[in-house]
Amino acid sequence: MEALGRRGAKLPRIEMIRPRNVIGKNTVECMQSGILYGYAGQVDGVVDRMAAELSTDPDEVQVIATGGLAPLVLGEARSIDVHEPWLTLIGLRLVYERNTAG
């Protein structure tokens, strides 16, 4: 997103928010749509491939979204099961507890 604004000759810097429609009516909406729905498609594609490698039944694989832009992709990526914004901190707490127990 930043590279488009910096390196695109006439492209504006945009805020990453959900566009009103998939088919944008102006440059900003088109950029937002392409980024949002493009990432959602990439997530689904990678998850499909990973699930196929991990399990004989890909529906058994649970997908957890985390990160700052996860809420935007949640409603668009069909493969996401759960949103956990604190996943990294939860993991760090578990590591600490295991290393200090006993």
Image: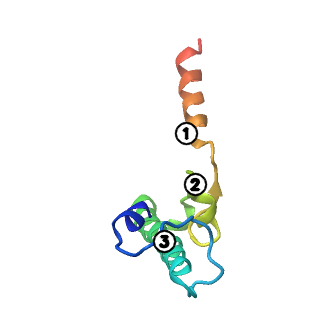
Image quarter (top left, top right, bottom left or bottom right) of the C terminus: top right
Q: Are marks 3 and 1 in contact (CB under 8 Å)?
A: no
* Quadrant housing residue 54: bottom left
* Quadrant housing residue 76: bottom right
Which circle, 1 or 2, is nearer the viewer?
1
In the rendered view, tell whether residue 35 sits above or below residue 67. below
In the rendered view, tell whether residue 60 sits above or below residue 31. above
Q: Could you give the CA–CA distance between mark 1 and mark 2, rounded to whole angstroms?
A: 12 Å
Q: Could you give the CA–CA distance between mark 3 and mark 2, rounded to whole angstroms?
A: 20 Å
- The percent coordinates of residue 47 (x first, y second) are 46, 65
Report helix, strand or loop for mark 1.
helix
Q: Is residue 81 left or right of residue 47?
A: right
Q: Is residue 50 left or right of residue 65?
A: left
- The percent coordinates of residue 40 (x first, y second) are 52, 70
| Residue located 64% across and 49% down the image | 84
In the rendered view, tell whether residue 52 sits above or below residue 29. above
In primary-sequence order, the first of circles 1 and 2 is 2
In the picture, the disc for residue 88 is 1
Report helix, strand or loop for mark 3.
helix
Q: What amino acid type is highlighted by mark number 3?
A: Ile
Q: What amino acid type is highlighted by mark number 1?
A: Thr
Q: What amino acid type is highlighted by mark number 2?
A: Ile
Q: Is residue 51 left or right of residue 69?
A: left
Report helix, strand or loop for mark 2.
strand
Dot 3 surroundings within 10 Å: few (below 14), some, or many (20 or more)? Answer: some
Q: Residue at label 3?
A: 35
In primary-sequence order, the first of circles 3 and 2 is 3
Q: Residue at label 2?
A: 64
